[in-house]
Amino acid sequence: MKTIKDINEKIKNGDAVVLTAEEMINVVEDIGPKNGAKEVDVVTTGTFGAMCSSGVFLNFGHADPPIKMMKTYLNGVEAYSGLAAVDAYLGAAQPNSDVDIDIDYGGGHVIEDLVAGKEIQLVAEGYTTDCYPRKRASTTITIEDLNQAILLNPRNCYQTYGAATNSREEKIYTYMGALLPEYSNINYSGAGQLNPLQNDYNIKNKSYNTIGIGTKIFLGGGIGYIIGEGTQHDPEGAFGTLMVKGDLKTMNRNFLRGATIPKYGSTLFIGIGVPIPILNEDIARACGIRDEEIMVPIVDYGVPRRDRPIVSKTNYKDLRTGEITIEIREDETGKVIEKTIKTASVSSYKKSIEVAEELKRWILKGEFTLSEPVDNLGRGSNKPMKPIAKLVRDIISRPPIVATSDISITEASKILIEKNINHLPIVDNNHKLVGILTSWDIARAVAQNINSIFDIMTRQVISTTLDEPIDVVARKMSKYNISGVPVIDKNGKIIGMVTAEDLSKLLGYKKH
Amino acid sequence: MKKRMYYWVDEKYIDKPIISEAILKTKIMINILMAKIMPQESFLIIELNGNKNQINEAMDILNRYGEIEDIPKIIERKDDKCIDCGACVIHCPVKAISQDRKYNVIFDDKECIGCKNCVKICPVKAIDVFDIY
């Protein structure tokens, strides 16, 4: 049996056999894991994707007179500085403080510009003390001016990530990219067979074979370390994550890139590669994992809840073909329909390969040796948050005041005035919602001399259900610029109304 | 054969069924890829499908009412920015973007109609599409 020490000796002597995780697949298949473990010393893995849970600790050094920085802006992006006087943490997902720039240039972009050596505008404000008399400081800096720029990412390198689709009738913008209406695309993320945690996963123990605290890695083109399991680490479910750190000053733009996920936020694409020492047969076998063996759930992001429904399952191999066929159960009819859907990656497999190959080159050249982890990763935890979410059922007034479309405009206006309401849902004989009439519609009818409810009502009604959180309803109202939303049941029958007034009343609630 | 072009219709003829005339007189098949009507002119991206004669005849008719122009190169990949993720591929309505076997994202200049769908979703702003009207 080999040890990490043995392997490092070989690396120093230029004798180590190093393969990428892609290359290892064929070796395990051709000569088996036992011989594979004899032949191969190190397998390099790689991933390159958007990792929002990333950021950089910066130390600016002291100005004269000195300032205790409390509000810190880099090119307009705020860094958290509730730390010692000149320390700050800049998060990748922080939008620009200039609302016109917003997510187009956020924390991730500043980090990229630092790495690129560009000049960055620094503005800091503080409260004054006897030892820190200065109120404001403003200057330009480059990464060279900083004492430290330490990339420290609480959650990177997801082992697998669910693919995303959208059941809604409208296009939605998510952290998984733009999702077209009615299951018209599937976006997925992840390096699959090249992913570090995937190649190191011990399925039996639901743990990791070699990766631990202190493992030396490739991070953004420089050298980094795994400092523990990442937040939301879930080895039981094969959804492990890593917390990593590295010196930003050693990294390069090839493997680290600021980005904007449209209408979602700014983020950081980063390349991470972990070397896996092939110490025994089990480790070699794990490194033979293929894209087709990695199950990927397809999740419906059209449902804006924590537990989004899984509509189907697939694997990375099929996803990478650009098109998959899945069966989807229709909500309304319960019918199962077959659908062929285009797939697109939102992470870069090409860059993932480049990461694994670059790390392989470093090791072959003897520049990078393996580290002995000081401890195993922790077991992690991925529990939900439990704020009390108010649902539509908690606030609706029932029964709703409705009308059928055969009443006159005058009758409709009487109902609105007598009942003191602004929205009148129009239903058919089965109490099914067919439209909605507002006081504004009636004003329009009078102004334009229109006599039929049918000609004036809105037919494409934005509606809600009893179990929808009121936050989702509030977002619908602001998105569609409306002030009332009918509540319908599974059969399309109206059972209540939620209005902007109902929601604004909640804001006035006193805490008990 | 297939020929794509820009077509500007002269102000005088904006309300005339010119495309129909070209189709009926030459039996050519025309696919309208983009159309925009403005007060001073209208602009179309059209694709003519037919034999050489049909295409020449159709172009003669179109030339009577406006101006034809070859589609210039309008899409450019900024190599220093593109990370070859492939997120843009499915957003192209005319299959001008593809990914090869080595996962390189490739633009086909000749196919691009300048709709900018890809520009809007690119996370690293790696695509330039030049304004055409």
Image (tube, coloured by chain):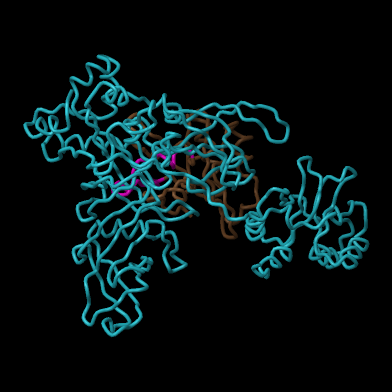
Chain colours: A cyan, B brown
Q: Could you tell whether A323 is left or right of A475 in the image? A: left
Work out whether A385 lies above or below A19. Answer: below
Asked if one can make out residue A164 in the rendered structure from this viewpoint, the answer is: yes
At horizontal 28% and vertical 54% (from top left) the residue drawn is: A151
Residue interval drawn in magenta:
B72-90
Q: Could you tell whether A485 is left or right of A429 in the image? A: left
Furthest-left residue in view?
A13
Asked if one can make out residue B74 in the rendered structure from this viewpoint, the answer is: no
The percent coordinates of residue A498 (x first, y second) are 75, 58
- Location of residue A274 by image quarter: top left
Residue A54 is covered by the magenta coloring: no
The percent coordinates of residue B72 (x first, y second) are 40, 46
Work out whether A159 lies above or below A150. Answer: above
Viewer-closest of A185 and B90: A185
Viewer-closest of A23 and A213: A213
- Location of residue A378 by image quarter: top left
Q: Main secondary structure of the magenta part?
A: loop
Residue B82 is covered by the magenta coloring: yes
The percent coordinates of residue A155 (x first, y second) are 38, 48
The number of numbered badges drawn on the structure is: 0
Work out whether A130 lies above or below B11. Answer: below
Viewer-closest of B36 and B57: B36
- Location of residue A350 by image quarter: top left
At horizontal 35% and vertical 71% (from top left) the residue drawn is: A72
Work out whether A136 lies above or below A265. Answer: below
